[in-house]
Amino acid sequence: MIVVKKQVILRGLFGAPIGLFITTAIAIGISYSVGNGNFYPVAPALAEHCGSELNAVFFQTVMSLLYGAVFGGASAIWEMERWSLLRQTVTHLAVVSLTTLPVALLLGWMQPSLGGFLGYFGLFLAIYAVIWLSIWLPIRRRLRRINRSL
């Protein structure tokens, strides 16, 4: 159990800067897509809520580090060899989705309404499914090859 906790902490520390990088890359991508030459580091609603763009950027930075840390730490779930793939998937999905929802609401990434929730969570689940399948299918192929060779 101590090894698992250590892995969660180490992966969380590694994941934090990745979360910040991804958030920054998304802000750059959105700014380029607007196409007027301006940089939009945060959602306008977040800047308004925080009182200034600087406060909003600071808050988003802290939340992005935390978000990345949770995703990094949650990756240790996949190392739980005694758990079934279904249990690993459901546990991982629960941890990351329960983190995603408040972060998305706090940072203004989604509208605080039923439609905003359903749209954002639907997109989250679709992305999650694509990533999960892209990991699972090669593993399945490899296991089939190993089983055939046995």
Image (spheres, rainbow, N blue to C red):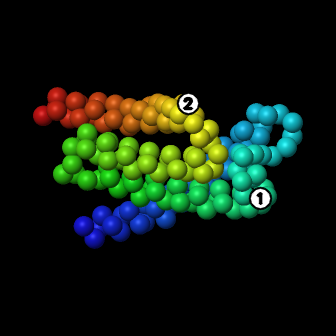
Report crowding for label 1: few under 14, some 14 to 19, many 20 or more residues within 10 A (C-alpha): few
Q: Distance between the residues labelled 2 and 1?
A: 27 Å
Query: Looking at the image, which residue is at 79% across and 58% down?
Result: 52
Where residue 54 sits in the image (x, y, percent)? 77, 60
Q: Is residue 75 left or right of residue 108?
A: left
Where residue 114 sits in the image (x, y, percent)? 53, 34
What's the amino acid at mark 1?
Gly
Q: Residue 130 got which mark?
A: none
Q: Is residue 98 left or right of residue 4?
A: right
Ranked by sequence position, the earlier of labels 2 and 1 is 1
Q: Name the residue under label 1.
A: 51
What's the amino acid at mark 2?
Gly
Q: Residue 115 got which mark?
A: 2
Q: Report helix, strand or loop for mark 2.
A: helix
**Which image quarter holds the N terminus?**
bottom left
Please report contact status of discs 2 and 1: CB closer than 8 Å, yes or no: no
Q: Is residue 116 left or right of residue 69?
A: right
Say above or below: 49 vs 141.
Answer: below
Where residue 109 sits in the image (x, y, percent)? 62, 42
Q: Report helix, strand or loop for mark 1.
A: loop
Residue at the front extreme? 113
Seen from the viewer's position, the closer of residues 41 and 119 is: 119
Query: Looking at the image, which residue is at 77% across and 40% down?
Result: 31
Residue at the bottom extreme? 2
Q: In this view, does 23 lie to the left or right of 2?
A: right
Taking the image as drawn, is residue 70 in sight? yes
